[in-house]
Image (cartoon, rainbow, N blue to C red):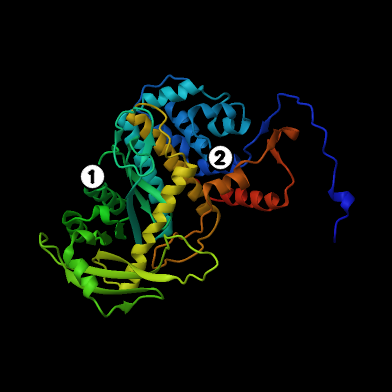
Amino acid sequence: MKPRRSDVRRQAHAVPELKFENQALTSFSGLVLFQQLFALLNLAARLRMCFRHLAGGKVFGPATIFLQLVVHLLLGFRELRDSRAYRDDPLVKRILGLGRLPDVSTVSRMLRNADAKSVENLRRLLREMLFERLATLELPRVTLDFDGSVQSTRRHAEGTAVGYNKKRTGARSYYPLFCTIAQTAQVLDLLHRSGNVHDSNGVQEFIRACVAAVRKALPGIAIEVRLDSAFFSDAIVTALHDAGIEFTLSVPFERFAELKRWIEQRRRWRRAGKDVSYFQADWKPKAWDRRFRFLFVRTRALRQHKEPIQLDLFIPHETGYDFKVIVTNKTLGARHAVAFHEGRGSQEGILGELKSHCQMGYVPVRRRLGNQSYLLAGLLAQNLTRELQMMSTPPARHTTPGRAALWAFEKLDTLRNSLLHRAGRLTRPQGALTLTLNANAWLQHQFPGLLQTLRTLRPAA
């Protein structure tokens, strides 16, 4: 039925008077979902175990402050002083189990006093929670992606250095290396490094540690690894192969004149798709002891016109080829092996979301361990948003050649705008704690269903 104009239009010229009252109003009603999630995961108690080696007696324990940092990042805030925006929010205080929130100086002091054992315990907790999810999925194989990302800062924080920085030349930075799980689009672990190291610095030991952790937690599972050309070396390729790990690794073929000659002289290419063709060969660089399978891939691409264009004339598209070489020990057909390797681009999406929505680019204090703790809070916030969606919805797809995530995840900022940032009022009619939200039809459909689904799940041991 078409609405009447008088039912739609209203006069809105008057500016309302401001009035402030002490009422139990919250700007973040969606936190009730994470409150239920934290209870299911027994998160508060597990965080206390990470800091149990520290002396007690403080009003605000380090576990509580760390949990506040996780909530801080879930809500979309960046700097520590931004916590003043929600210091009186009753739902934030309730999810933290506090009557009042700590001052900014208290949070900053906790980060400055962070110790190596606490950071290691937080990394272990990050891995354990992800392994619990993988164990419930009962997957036959798991895919590990490795890549680094720059954390720039204008301050002289401990452990930062001037290195390669495409966006901020000359800035001091960290260069952490991340291991992500393709099937759940979550971060398994990180290796924190200074900004002036090469991509491959420490990667062999880090890969070995991640693989050992997966095999210990999930015995019998097959492990796949994908790496870009920065990690190409005889030591890494041989170590992965000898450990029984399937891998694909981009080859910086510009360093090998023989590979370039093969591509230039090749006349017959096999088709692997509409615009993709390939050939393969068993080969090894001269310094290597063993031959491996090398896939030579070319992709048809449009060439950009750099010269001035006369808009009144028709300019036809020029086509050419982009080339890449992949080394692998997989026995898949070339088409599926290439699709598997190309799937590692999903990790760029994970790192991009960490930077954009979990404040991975922010360096809050001058101490290195404190900055690692803040980064781990962001990784945990990211993983928790994935866990919330995995608990409340079934998988959207089966295993694909490119190892796309099994769920079609919403981004964190989408969850913030649609669920988290919802105004509400906490009341106790007849003694029952009640959260009242605006009667939005979409929200009435989504919110109770999500909360009821979480309430039916069994808490973690």
Foreground residue, 19 or 138? 19
Foreground residue, 234 or 405? 234
Q: Which residue is mark 2?
A: 35
> As displayed, is residue 243 above or below residue 377?
below
> As displayed, is residue 260 above or below residue 116?
below
Q: Which residue is mark 1?
A: 201
Query: Callout 1: 10 Å neighbours few (<14), some, many (20+)?
Result: some
193 sits left or right of 396 in the view: left
Q: In this view of the protein, can residue 461 be seen by the observer?
A: no
* Rendering coords of residue 195 (x, y %): 30, 38
Q: Count the marks.
A: 2
> Are discs 1 and 2 less than 8 Å apart at CB?
no
* Rendering coords of residue 97 (x, y %): 55, 30
Using the rendered view, name the quadrant where residue 165 is placed: top left
> As displayed, is residue 85 above or below residue 393?
above
Q: Residue at x 53, y 60 (%)?
A: 394
Residue at the bottom extreme of this rendering = 268
| Amino acid carrying mark 1 in the image | Asn
* Rendering coords of residue 41 (x, y %): 48, 43
> Helix or strand or loop: what does disc 2 sit on?
helix
Q: Residue at x 76, y 26 (%)?
A: 18
Q: Earlier in the sequence, mark 1 or mark 2?
A: 2
Using the rendered view, name the quadrant where residue 75 is placed: top right
Using the rendered view, name the quadrant where residue 89 is placed: top right
* Rendering coords of residue 413 (x, y %): 55, 46
Where is the N terminus found, in terms of image quarters?
bottom right
> Helix or strand or loop: what does disc 1 sit on?
loop
* Cα distance in 3D space between marks 1 and 2: 39 Å
Where is the C terminus found, in terms of image quarters?
top left
